[in-house]
Image (cartoon, rainbow, N blue to C red):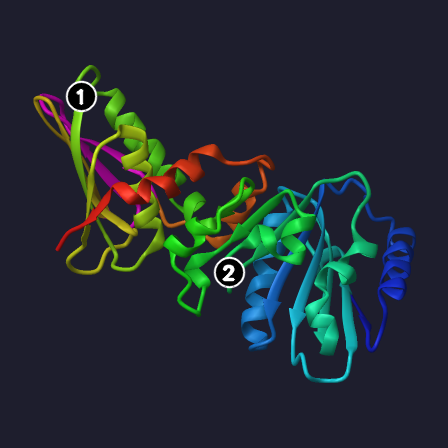
């Protein structure tokens, strides 16, 4: 159900949310407030974002406040939609189109609509700010999630690392969670051998490959050579070789759904690892609302990554 509120105010939106909950017997067990900031650059991408939020909400029922910033030079205006039931998944979603000076005051816009006594998470599903924690929404939230995969302005992982504050994360990190578990399992199969170095190959310019390299550098304390994978791959990380005493441990993509693990003197094994959707990545990010120390170490580990050919 979509309730349209043209040329409205946050007071009217709050009243409509209360009325919708009472009239439609909606559950009140929202576990957090999710603030989502995007630019008004095409309805199709906004629809994709709303679909991602809806799918992620089934694991994390929330009040979702989507702020779509338009022309900052236009007269001030707020148009809104309140989405509930099938159009909002397990959440209640407020989509707000902002014009004029409202685009520079996002914190003031969302404050009257925050759920009391629940965590606040800020998300930028497309364009990532250089310092998420220093933005108006970032200062309200204890958790801040970006998505370099969808960034169209060329925001780099290095710039994001320079602006890092505890509580920051990126969906490129959760994108490789199953792969990281596979790597840890591969090393467990070959215990007691020191890792002397590592080489990783993946799609050129893919931040998830760089994050994986930084994670290895920080976790293993070795230099990691980052190469560009030759030819198309179904998964961002095509190949990993861990140079250990006694031989290499390798994790290599076989197809869109399988990676092969090879270790000296052991038979090859195969593990199912597939591409993750943005909804799956966002749902994982929302499972833990404290600082992600491992992600921070992966960012710091970027200094130990050497670019190869």
Judge the density around disc 2: few (<14), some (14-19), many (≥20) Cα neighbours within 10 Å. many
Disc 1 is placed on an element classified as: loop
Judge the density around disc 1: few (<14), some (14-19), many (≥20) Cα neighbours within 10 Å. few
> Considering only vertical position in the picture, is 213 above or below 128?
above
In the figure, residue 191 lies in which quadrant?
Answer: top left
Q: Residue furthest bottom?
A: 74
Give the percent coordinates (x, y) of residue 89. Answer: 68, 53
Residues tagged 2 and 1 counted as in contact (Cβ below 8 A): no
Seen from the viewer's position, the closer of residues 273 and 139 is 139
**Residue at coordinates 30% horizontally, 52% vertically from top-left?**
236
Give the percent coordinates (x, y) of residue 43. Answer: 59, 76
Disc 2 is placed on an element classified as: loop
* Left or right, 141 with reference to 177: right
**Residue at coordinates 89% horizontally, 54% vertically from top-left?**
18
Q: Earlier in the sequence, mark 2 or mark 1?
A: 2
**Can you identify the residue that label 2 sits on?**
128
Judge whether residue 1 is colored magenta.
Answer: no
* Left or right, 205 with reference to 16: left
- For the question of whether residue 55 can be seen, the reply is no
**Residue at coordinates 35% horizontally, 53% vertically from top-left?**
207
**Can you identify the residue that label 1 sits on?**
194
> Considering only vertical position in the picture, is 225 above or below 124?
above
- For the question of whether residue 275 can be seen, the reply is yes
Seen from the viewer's position, the closer of residues 205 and 162 is 162
**Residue at coordinates 50% horizontally, 36% vertically from top-left?**
292
User: In the rendered view of the protein, which quadrant contains the C terminus?
Assistant: bottom left
Q: Which residues are magenta?
A: 255-273
> Considering only vertical position in the picture, is 226 above or below 17?
above
Q: Alpha carbon of mark 2 to alpha carbon of mark 1: how far?
A: 38 Å
Give the percent coordinates (x, y) of residue 249. Answer: 16, 30
């Amino acid at each position: 159900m979509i309730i349209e509120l043209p040329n409205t105010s946050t007071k009217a939106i709050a009243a409509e949310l209360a009325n919708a909950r009472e009239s439609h017997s909606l559950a009140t067990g929202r576990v957090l407030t999710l603030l989502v900031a995007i630019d008004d650059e095409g309805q199709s991408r906004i629809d994709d974002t709303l679909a991602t939020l809806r799918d992620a909400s089934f694991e994390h029922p929330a009040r979702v406040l989507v702020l779509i910033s338009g022309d900052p030079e236009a007269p001030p205006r707020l148009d809104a939609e309140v989405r509930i039931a099938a159009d909002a998944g397990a959440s209640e979603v407020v989509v707000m189109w902002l014009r004029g000076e409202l685009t520079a005051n996002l914190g003031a816009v969302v404050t009257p609509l925050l759920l009391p006594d629940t965590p606040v998470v800020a998300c930028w599903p497309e364009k990532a700010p250089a310092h998420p924690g220093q933005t108006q929404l970032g200062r309200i939230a204890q958790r801040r999630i970006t998505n370099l995969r969808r960034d169209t302005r060329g925001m780099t992982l290095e710039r994001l690392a320079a602006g890092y504050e505890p509580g920051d994360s990126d969906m490129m990190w959760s994108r490789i969670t199953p792969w990281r578990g596979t790597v840890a399992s591969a090393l467990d199969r070959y215990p007691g051998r020191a890792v002397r170095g590592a080489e990783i190959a993946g799609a050129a310019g893919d931040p998830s490959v760089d994050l994986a390299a930084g994670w290895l550098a920080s976790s293993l304390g070795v230099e990691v050579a980052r190469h560009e994978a030759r030819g198309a791959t179904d998964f961002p990380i095509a190949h990993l070789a861990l140079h250990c005493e006694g031989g290499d441990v390798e994790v290599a993509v076989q197809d869109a759904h399988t990676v092969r693990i090879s270790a000296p003197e052991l038979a090859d094994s195969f593990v199912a690892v597939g591409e993750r959707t943005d909804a799956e990545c966002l749902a994982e990010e929302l499972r833990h609302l404290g600082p992600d120390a491992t992600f921070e170490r992966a960012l710091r580990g970027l200094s130990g990554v050497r670019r190869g050919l």
